[in-house]
Amino acid sequence: MTGVSALVILYPMSDLAPELARLSPRQRLDLIESLWESLEVEEVPVTDTQRAELDRRIAGFEQDQEHNISWDQLKAELQQRG
């Protein structure tokens, strides 16, 4: 168990804010990523407008396969920039 996940178990939510503020930006981002990845698709609320936009983007993605890149390629490219 990481120190970040231990915080979530050891402290009530109301006591977490000061503890989270002590984390480095990288640690907070790692926590956000871990929390996001722990959610199931059906647990993320999406409005009808957001759903329509997602459907539009998926359709565009599926129609233009030759210009698409994988998440791993994009992530590597972004890491090289920053």
Image (spheres, helix red, strand yellow):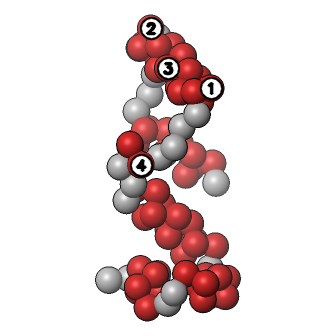
How many other residues sit within 10 Å of disc 3, few (<14), some (14-19) or many (≥20)? few
Residue at image mark 1:
49
Mark earlier in primary sequence (4, 3): 4
Q: Which amino acid does label 4 sit on?
A: Glu
| Residue 39, x across and y down, in percent | 39, 54
* Vertical comparison of 15 with 31: above or below: below
Secondary structure under tag 3 reads helix
Marks 3/2: CA–CA distance: 12 Å
Marks 4/3: CA–CA distance: 18 Å
Secondary structure under tag 4 reads helix
Residue at image mark 4:
43
Which one is closest to the eye, mark 2 or mark 1?
1
Q: What residue type is labelled 1?
A: Thr
Residue at image mark 2:
63
Marks 2/1: CA–CA distance: 21 Å
How many other residues sit within 10 Å of disc 4, few (<14), some (14-19) or many (≥20)? few
Q: Pointers 2 and 4 in contact (CB under 8 A)?
A: no
Residue at image mark 3:
55
Secondary structure under tag 2 reads helix
| Residue 9, x across and y down, in percent | 40, 85
Q: How many marks?
A: 4
How many other residues sit within 10 Å of disc 2, few (<14), some (14-19) or many (≥20)? few
Residue 37 in view: yes
| Residue 13, x across and y down, in percent | 55, 81
Marks 4/1: CA–CA distance: 17 Å
How many other residues sit within 10 Å of disc 1, few (<14), some (14-19) or many (≥20)? few
